[in-house]
Image: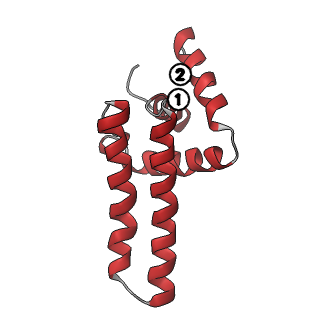
Amino acid sequence: MTEPQTFPQFWTFYVLAHRQPLTRIFHTAGTLAGWSLLATAIVLRKPWYILAAFAVPYALAWFSHFFVEHNRPATFGHPLWSWLADQKMVAMVLAGKMGAEVRRCAAVERAGSTA
């Protein structure tokens, strides 16, 4: 796949880098933990929790990429799009729609398109 130039192209790339359900579980757990830690930091006025709010999601996500997907996290090349795509993916996981999205993006990949 060529380097994505738009967020819809990146989304397809991102989804295909998260084909394994276990990867998506790690990402979802990390993202939800990160938001919880951020809320805790605000409520308890514990600024160091903010560091954990970033560290926990990235640690879980990177672990899943290196040991489950065996690929490189998209964060390195596109940090903002990666964060946005992660939020979208977690919402779709929680809604039970991510498996269908993986199949859709895989069909797009097979067809040779990126949107």
Q: Helix or strand or loop: what does disc 1 sit on? A: helix
Residue in the image at 62% along x and 32% along y? 99
Residue in the image at 43% along x and 31% along y? 17
48 is higher (above) or lower (below) than 15: below
The residue that disc 1 covers is 12
Q: Which colour style is shown? A: secondary structure
x and y percentages locating residue 92 in the rendered image: 64, 44
Does residue 74 appear to the left or right of 8 in the view shown? left
**Amino acid beneath label 2:** Thr
Can you tell which quarter of the image residue 81 is in?
Answer: top left
Local crowd at mark 2 within 10 Å, few (<14), some, or many (≥20)? Answer: many
| Residue 75 seen in this snapshot | no
Between 99 and 16, the one lying in front of the other is: 99
Q: Given this view, does label 2 or label 1 mark the residue nearer the observer?
A: 1
**Amino acid beneath label 1:** Thr
Does residue 53 appear to the left or right of 77 in the view shown? right
The residues bearing labels 2 and 1 have C-alpha atoms spaced at a distance of 6 Å
| CB atoms of marks 2 and 1 within 8 Å | yes
43 is higher (above) or lower (below) than 51: below
Residue in the image at 45% along x and 32% along y? 5
| Residue 96 seen in this snapshot | yes
x and y percentages locating residue 80 in the rendered image: 42, 51
Of the 4 image quadrants, the one containing the N terminus is top left
Q: Helix or strand or loop: what does disc 2 sit on? A: loop
Of the 4 image quadrants, the one containing the C terminus is top right
The residue that disc 2 covers is 114
